Image (cartoon, rainbow, N blue to C red):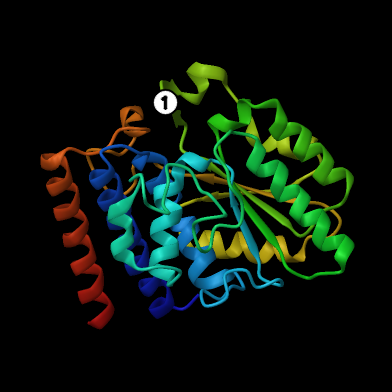
Amino acid sequence: MDIKEKKQLEITAMKIRMGVIEGTFNAKSGHPGGSLSLTDILTYLYFKEMDIDPKYPKWEDRDRFVLSKGHAAPGLYSTLAHRGFFPVEHLKTLRKTDSDLQGHPNMHYTPGVDMSTGSLGQGISTAVGMALGAKRAGKSFRVFAALGDGELGEGQVWEAAMFAAAKGLDNLIVFVDNNNLQIDGTVEEVNSPYPINEKFSAFGFEVIEIDGHSFDEIEAAVNKAKTVKGRPIAIIAKTVKGKGVSFMENRCEWHGTAPNAEQYELAMSELKTKLQDLEENANG
């Protein structure tokens, strides 16, 4: 990845983070922490990697993305908005009664959402079904999915993983957002999923471990995943919950808490300053 391209991705990611804060603040509810930890992965997939067209969100041969950790919808919505699936202004309607941006993704209402998710474990299962369907239909599109590390406590995740390996679904790339925090503590304290890498390997996956905030590492992992044949791929991404907003970082209370007016101003000021610095650096 050249420097100019990486700088543009960093700028885009910062704008997406601002959208997360904008949406959750206006909703007075939502999940900013896990949305912010996943932002760089979403940015890379939607702005660099995935074969998609916002003008034709139901294009049959598009790559698919399934947000298995569906509570991180603010992050997905902000990404879709900045990618052009719907106006960025719509982010302010998050969770409103008449909005098409509900608390969890709904494929029937929101342009660009490939699968309705929310109940943990079900998203990865449907992603596996999509990948199998592509294989049987002779289609070349790929299926990407994002799991939370806390979500790994769901038995359905491992049923899906076992099936994906049994069917040799090398068109399935699963990101695990390993920010090590869930709603009421660290994943180790609540129900440890570690060692995550060894578990996916034991279930027949090709495993790649990365820094989930490094675009270079995300790209290298995705490129390596494309070379894997006969087995699904799990990219274990070490991330920071609340990434980008200093007072939210590594704090489990920001799992499902929206910022109040004062916190909104602090967060947006910090993100705007970072965005300005990135833009000046890109033009310098």
Q: Amino acid at mark 1?
A: Ile
In the image, what residue occupies the spot 59% across and 69% down? 50
Measured as percent of width and height from the top left, residue 20 is found at 32, 51
Rendered view: 79 above or below 237: below
Residue at which label 1 appears: 183
Name the side, left or right, on which 246 lies relative to 181: left
Measured as percent of width and height from the top left, residue 49 is found at 57, 70
Task: Bin the neighbour count of mark 1 within 10 Å (Cα to Cα): few under 14, some 14-19, many 20 and up.
Answer: some
In the image, what residue occupies the spot 28% across and 63% down? 89
How many numbered discs?
A: 1
- Quarter of the image for residue 121 reads top right
* Residue, far front: 98
In the image, what residue occupies the spot 64% across and 43% down? 123
- Quarter of the image for residue 138 reads bottom right
Rendered view: 240 above or below 101: above
Name the side, left or right, on which 235 lies relative to 270: right
Quarter of the C terminus within the rendering: bottom left
- Quarter of the image for residue 184 reads top left
Rendered view: 272 above or below 257: below
177 or 128, which lies in front?
128
Name the side, left or right, on which 198 lies relative to 18: right
* Residue, far bottom: 283
Mark 1 lies on a secondary structure that is: loop
41 or 263, which lies in front?
263
Measured as percent of width and height from the top left, residue 243 is found at 34, 46
Name the side, left or right, on which 175 lies relative to 74: right
State whether residue 241 appears in this view.
no
State whether residue 274 appears in this view.
yes
Measured as percent of width and height from the top left, residue 120 is found at 59, 33
